[in-house]
Structure formats: structure tokens, C-alpha cells
Amino acid sequence: MKIGELLLKAALINTGQLQVVLMEKDIYANLRLGDIISLHGWVAQETIDFFVEEWPQLIQAKEKKPLGFYLQRAALLTEAQIQQILKDQWQASYRFGALAVLNGWLKQETINFFLQHINPNALKESTRIEKATLSDISRVRVPKVPCSKQMLTDELQRQLIDPEDLADIDINLDDVTWLN
């Protein structure tokens, strides 16, 4: 698979960016596709090098490593981000990829791409927090004191629950006295 297609499937570039690069390839005949992508700043050169040099061997390897290993090798997550995810994972019991997405460090499509190639069984399980479940709601501690919507949103985020996940669920907030 060519690097452009690979980066597109990994959701690291979009189709518009790939089209631009393919047009520019005719202009800059001495540059490789990955070099042009990197020059635009759309994907780090280390990430491109990973997909060109290491990815083919890693996905063929019989012994698979944890998701964080591949994301760090691809220069998509730093060691500090991985340690933060592991800490949050231990506290919140969410999957590694879901926390990387919730922190805004990666797209869900990128996580899915890696899982599809390194651990397809994990991909079948829920890696995205689509909607809060009843067990999530039972963990929400709604303050019984007057508070603003922003205060409630901040509390939900502190508990690693996205307030938007609760939007479609009937939840009785009668105990909340809104200040504004």
C-alpha cells in the first residue's frame, strides 16, 4: 500500500490533502509523497518514516504489543501522553484508545486503523464512548447544592464523563438548583 493511501486510511490526512500532494508531486518530482506531506506540516516526518520503514514488519509480527507501543513508535503519542492515559485508564476503566480520543490527541478513526491491523478482536469491542450507559449515569454525582450548568459540566468532565454523552438520556436533574 502506498504511503498516501496508508495515511488516508489511518485518518492522518484527508482526501483533499492527498489530492493536493498528488498535484504537487508533478511539480516537485524530486520529492517523495511523504516528504511533501511532511513539508505541509500535516503529518510529522517521524510518523511517515514509521509507516514506510516499520509498519509493514510490525503488522506481520506474530507477537503483538500494546496499542500505546505502536502509537509512540509512530510519533502520534509522547511518553508523557501515554503515561497520562495509563493513569486515567487505571482510574476510570476506559480503554486506552478511548482515552487518547477523549483527550483530543488522536481521532477515533486512527485508533480503529491501528486496532484493525494489530488487534481486530479489540476493534469489535467498544473503543468509543458512544452514549453513557446506566452504569455511567449511576457514577455521576450530581451536586445537591445550587450550581450553574458550567459547574455541572466541569464536574462531569472531572469524572471523565462527556456531558454530551448524557444529552440523549433521560436523567432527572430535579435535585439541581440552577443559578443561571
Image (cartoon, grey):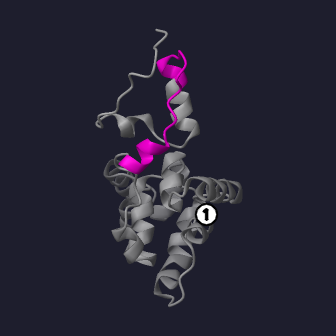
Left or right: residue 170 versus residue 148 is left
Is 101 one of the magenta-colored residues? no
SS class of the residue under badge 1?
A: helix
Is 148 one of the magenta-colored residues? yes
Who is closer to the viewer here, 30 or 144? Answer: 144
Which residue of the protein is positioned furthest toward the top in this rendering?
Answer: 180
Left or right: residue 16 versus residue 104 is left
Residue corresponding to mark 1: 46
Q: Residues in magenta?
A: 134-151
At horizontal 57% and vertical 56% (from top left) the residue drawn is 44
At horizontal 47% and vertical 87% (from top left) the residue drawn is 60
110, above or below 163, in the image: below
The image shows residue 168 at horizontal and vertical percentages of 28, 36
The image shows residue 42 at horizontal and vertical percentages of 50, 50
Who is closer to the viewer here, 100 or 130? Answer: 130
Residue 10 seen in the current view: no
Who is closer to the viewer here, 38 or 54? Answer: 54
Count the marks: 1
